[in-house]
Image (tube, coloured by chain):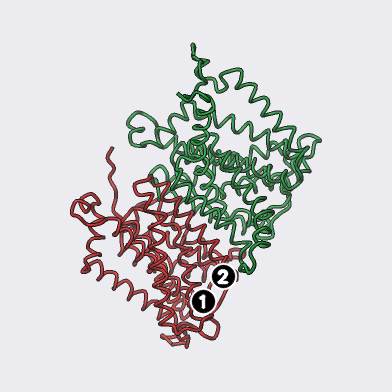
Chain colours: A green, B red
């Protein structure tokens, strides 16, 4: 089912290939050309900003997916680690003049290390206990950020735009290329990570950590590694967030954002690489474009006498409803639907 | 000294409310092993509901209180019936995520209905706020009321679990779900009742805490702080919640009162979370929690 009709694998390289047939390659290249040429030409500033936000969200969600979807370690404080990355990178570039690419990596590494610290309880506990620990982590991190002189506290801080060499990414169109290149790298890394020994160890731990330990997987080491990788992605996303939005404040890193991230990977499909991409795209488009620009004015024009809290209350209600409905109706997420769709069109029109 | 006594009393009364909310959590966790992360929103919502009945509609407080309890019963039933029932026997991630989703939804609903971000009871308090003197300390009477009502609810719940048929059924379900089903006890009704009871307890907590400090969106975080009570006391222990609640309240109130290093404002809001991390590292199953042994 996973291979197009009539294709057979005759050696290991073919078996492991992600893009197996010529059609796959053609579709990949066409997709990349569309991705890199279309948006800056045909979309306005609002959409470009949304695309950048989607890209950043995809990176963070991929990390969360490795942690939750592959390794089964519940984390509901992911935004806290994004905040660590964002502020690390912002402080390094604006106070110490570190170049952007270096601070990007530093943000990832420091975020990962903080992730390991808060992931330490995962060695002993799991499930709800771990979820609570990560919630606590988020609140502690946000509190430290808002009370530390270097970060500007509640006033926030301004961050220089990302720059590589002499090239400054100061417009949404330029940032789009920066973000998308990193997104592609992240997707490539995440996809391949899950096919290696490490990824298989993660899956073994998710399915049953005691059984995995009995079979010789060093569970505590791999759990911490999962925390490191997941938070590394979060740090990278945070750094990009800081350097594309110009100003940074703690309000961007609320607990509700963390819930949104969990919602994204559930709606997309846990334990798949394409899932976080779907989830991030759907939530960000809803949040930044569909609801505020189209839905709210339309509803306000058609229905009179809406309560005053309508505009700000609609988004959380829709998000909450989407999460609950997906969990009840399609717990395997959009990735499963996507797989069904692929299987269907490969066989079409002869579905047997 | 009088200052210390004041901090202790306020800490104890806020802690009592935390204990009540934590009780709401333990109720659901014990009967159906669902971690209810929407507690904060339920607390906030019932506080607002009480406000709108009591202040906006001008009902007497006992009537408003009865209405709040009926509202909480309905809320609990709806949540269990439409969101949790279809997810019975799903992995814990789904169960946690669904309550997060419910919390998010309720968040929106609250903004929808009550757009104001804060509200106070002003000169029309729920409980008389004449001051009383305990030794050298001057304390508002409200705190004593909160502690008293908290203890009363706890005693009522204990009696319910001890003597009422449903309470016994709920304890049995917590013990062994399969055996209970084999005995012909409708497990779904047990789940439903536990959600309704939990919502009522959380709603009482919401009314009590809003009577002290008014209503603000920060009340939703009270639900999260109550998790530190649950973690410290042990996830499946009523007594643990009752002891850990005032402990957390005390720690919070004392930290807020005495740790006043420059720039450390708001430390009281993170104290419960720091306690969570410490407990997690030292004694993950809490003071009175049952240590689980896993089998493959």
- Residue behind mark 2: B114
Label 2 marks a residue whose chain is B
Tag 2 and tag 1, C-beta contact below 8 Å: yes
Q: Nearer the viewer, residue A72 or B60?
A: B60
Is residue B247 at all visible to an observer of this figure? no
Query: Circle 1: is it few (<14), some (14-19), or many (20+) Cα within 10 Å?
Result: some
Q: Residue furthest front?
A: A349
Q: Position of residue B26 (x, y in %)?
A: 34, 60
Q: Quadrant of residue B80?
A: bottom left
Camera-side residue of B258 and B164: B164
Seen in the picture, residue A181 relative to B190 is either above or below; the reply is above
- Left or right of A298? Residue A224 is left
Q: How many marks?
A: 2
The residue marked by circle 1 belongs to what chain?
A: B
Using the image, tell me which numbered label, if any, was put on residue B197: none
Of A335 and A92, which appears nearest the observer?
Answer: A335
x and y percentages locating residue B60 in the rendered image: 45, 85
Residue for point 63% across, 42% down: A237
Where residue B114 sits: x, y (%)?
A: 56, 70
Seen in the picture, residue A104 relative to B9 is either above or below; the reply is above
CA distance separating discs 2 and 1: 9 Å
**In terms of secondary structure, where does tag 1 sit?**
helix
**In the depicted structure, whether residue B222 falls above or below residue A244:** below
Q: Residue furthest left?
A: B183
Q: Residues within 10 Å of mark 2 (few under 14, many from 20)?
A: many
Residue A217, image quadrant? top left
Q: Is residue A7 visible?
A: yes
Residue B96 image point, x, y percent: 43, 51
| Residue beneath disc 1 | B52
């Amino acid at each position: 089912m996973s291979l197009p009709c009539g294709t057979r694998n005759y050696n290991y390289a073919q078996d492991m290939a992600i893009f197996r047939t010529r059609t796959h390659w053609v579709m990949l290249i066409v997709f990349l050309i569309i991705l890199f040429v279309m948006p800056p030409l045909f979309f306005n500033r609002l959409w470009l900003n949304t695309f950048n936000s989607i890209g950043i969200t995809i990176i963070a969600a991929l990390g969360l997916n490795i942690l939750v979807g592959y390794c089964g370690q519940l984390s509901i404080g992911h935004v806290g680690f994004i905040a660590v990355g964002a502020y690390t990178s912002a402080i390094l570039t604006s106070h110490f003049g570190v170049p952007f690419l270096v601070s990007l990596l530093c943000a990832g590494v420091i975020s990962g290390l903080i992730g390991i610290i808060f992931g330490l309880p995962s060695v002993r506990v799991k499930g709800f206990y771990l979820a609570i620990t990560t919630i606590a982590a988020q609140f502690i991190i946000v509190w430290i950020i808002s009370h530390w002189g270097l970060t500007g506290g509640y006033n926030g801080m301004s961050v220089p735009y990302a720059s590589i060499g002499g090239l400054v990414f100061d417009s949404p169109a330029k940032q789009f290329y920066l973000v998308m290149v990193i997104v592609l790298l992240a997707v490539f890394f995440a996809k391949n990570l899950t096919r290696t020994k490490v990824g298989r160890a993660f899956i073994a731990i998710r399915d049953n950590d005691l059984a995995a330990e009995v079979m010789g997987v060093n569970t505590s080491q791999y759990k911490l590694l999962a925390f490191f990788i997941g938070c590394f992605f979060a740090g990278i996303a945070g750094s990009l967030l800081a350097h594309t939005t110009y100003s940074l404040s703690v309000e961007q890193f609320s607990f509700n954002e963390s819930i949104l991230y969990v919602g994204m990977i559930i709606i997309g499909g846990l334990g798949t690489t394409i899932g976080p991409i779907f989830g991030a795209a759907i939530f960000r488009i809803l949040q930044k474009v569909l609801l505020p620009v189209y839905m709210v004015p339309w509803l306000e024009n058609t229905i009179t006498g809406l309560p005053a809290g309508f505009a700000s209350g609609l988004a959380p209600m829709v998000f909450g409803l989407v999460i609950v409905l997906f969990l009840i109706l399609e717990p395997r997420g959009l990735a499963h639907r996507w797989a069904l769709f692929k299987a269907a069109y490969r066989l079409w029109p002869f579905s047997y | 000294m009088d200052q210390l006594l004041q901090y202790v009393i306020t800490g104890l009364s806020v802690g009592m409310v935390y204990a009540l909310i934590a009780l709401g959590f333990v109720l659901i966790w014990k009967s159906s092993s669902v971690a209810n992360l929407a507690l904060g929103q339920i607390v906030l919502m019932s506080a607002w509901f009480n406000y709108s009945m009591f202040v906006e509609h001008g009902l007497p407080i006992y009537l408003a209180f009865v209405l709040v309890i009926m509202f909480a019963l309905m809320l609990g039933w709806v949540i269990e019936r439409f969101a949790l029932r279809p997810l019975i026997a799903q992995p814990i991630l789904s169960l946690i995520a669904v309550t997060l989703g419910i919390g998010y939804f309720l968040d929106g609903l609250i903004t929808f209905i009550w757009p104001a971000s804060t509200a106070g009871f002003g000169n029309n308090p729920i409980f008389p706020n004449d001051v009383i003197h305990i030794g050298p300390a001057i304390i508002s009477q409200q705190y004593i009321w909160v502690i008293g009502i908290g203890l009363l609810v706890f005693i009522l719940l204990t009696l319910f679990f001890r003597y009422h048929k449903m309470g016994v059924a709920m304890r049995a379900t917590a013990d062994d779900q399969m055996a209970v089903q084999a005995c012909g006890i409708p497990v779904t009704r047990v789940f439903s009742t536990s959600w309704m009871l939990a919502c009522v307890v959380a709603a009482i907590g919401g009314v009590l805490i809003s009577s002290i400090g008014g209503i603000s969106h920060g009340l939703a975080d009270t639900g999260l702080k109550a998790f530190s009570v649950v973690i410290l006391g042990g996830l499946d222990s009523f007594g643990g919640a009752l002891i850990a609640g005032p402990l957390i309240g005390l720690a919070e109130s004392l930290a807020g009162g005495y740790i006043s290093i420059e720039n450390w404002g708001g430390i009281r809001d993170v104290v419960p979370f720091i306690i969570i991390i410490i407990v997690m590292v030292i004694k993950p199953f809490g003071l009175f929690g049952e240590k689980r042994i896993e089998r493959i």
